[in-house]
Amino acid sequence: MNFLQKYSVFISVFLTLGIIGGGLYVIQGLKEKSKSLSEEIEEKLKEVRKYEVSRETAPTATLLAKLSREKVALEAEYQGLEEGFKTYSKFVPNKDEKFPNLYFKEVLYITLDDIIERAKKNGTKIPSSLDFSETGLPSDGEVPGLLLRLDMLEKIMNVIMESKISTVNSITIGVPAPAAFYKEIPIDLTVTDTSFKVAKFLEALGKSPSIFILNSIAITKKGKDLEAKLKIKGLVREQK
């Protein structure tokens, strides 16, 4: 008796079990796919049932066309705002700048010296530090944020000088925070002057080519003058 004849029964059983096992594997896979498809169909049915209740919200061809028009209009409006927002930071190191921290130090000294000189000519009393340390070198990673803060200091001081404010009691330029396509820089500012000069400063703040948002203001009487404590957000874009 040859091998096949001798073990034909075992081979048949083995093949049968193999076929059964393979069939069970396929069936299991089909069950899983069927379950997944059933769940997906159920989700779609839920959406359809919602539209049955509120037919006006169903995605008809008319509604889709309307939504497409609104999308185009919103994109055009956004593009218009984005193009109109030209408040860029003026301090931008060259892309091949090897020592950005030294670049920052250079523009810091130049900018502070210019502000101090203009304040003297304008008769404006300003704090000695202006919220920037003139000692030490920042890390390269700190430079972009410091340049934005320095740019905002110059912008707000331009408005102060234009308004002929007599005294800047304190000024703090906060850390830039990302918002859409620009950065928001918080400014805490306290100034003292006559009611007319304070009002003129607020008017100049609103008319400035730079964009400022007045979050809050607290005014107290200081003799014949007013002391105004302001919380402002300055908006600025980084040039790429």
Image (cartoon, grey):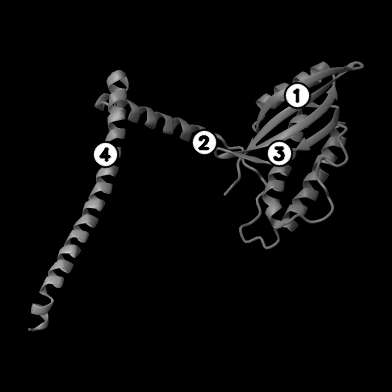
Give the alpha-carbon distance from disc 1 to disc 4, as whole Å: 67 Å
- Name the residue beneath numbered marker 1: 201
- Front tag of 1 and 3: 3
Q: Please, what is the three-letter code of the amino acid marked with disc 2?
A: Glu
- Name the residue beneath numbered marker 3: 152
Q: Please, what is the three-letter code of the amino acid marked with disc 3?
A: Met
Q: Please identify the quadrant where the N terminus is shown.
A: bottom left
Within-10-Å neighbours for mark 4: few <14, some 14–19, many 20+: few
Q: Earlier in the sequence, mark 3 or mark 2?
A: 2
Within-10-Å neighbours for mark 1: few <14, some 14–19, many 20+: many
Q: Which of 231 and 110 lies nearest the eye of the viewer?
A: 231
Q: Name the residue at the right extreme.
A: 223
What is the secondary structure assignment of the residue under circle 4?
helix
Q: Tell me where residue 47 appears, x and y as whole percent.
A: 31, 29
Q: Earlier in the sequence, mark 1 or mark 3?
A: 3
Q: Earlier in the sequence, mark 4 or mark 3?
A: 4
Q: Are marks 4 and 3 in contact (CB under 8 Å)?
A: no
- The circle drawn on residue 57 is none
Q: Tell me where residue 112 appears, x and y as whole percent.
A: 81, 44
- The circle drawn on residue 38 is 4
What is the secondary structure assignment of the residue under circle 1?
helix
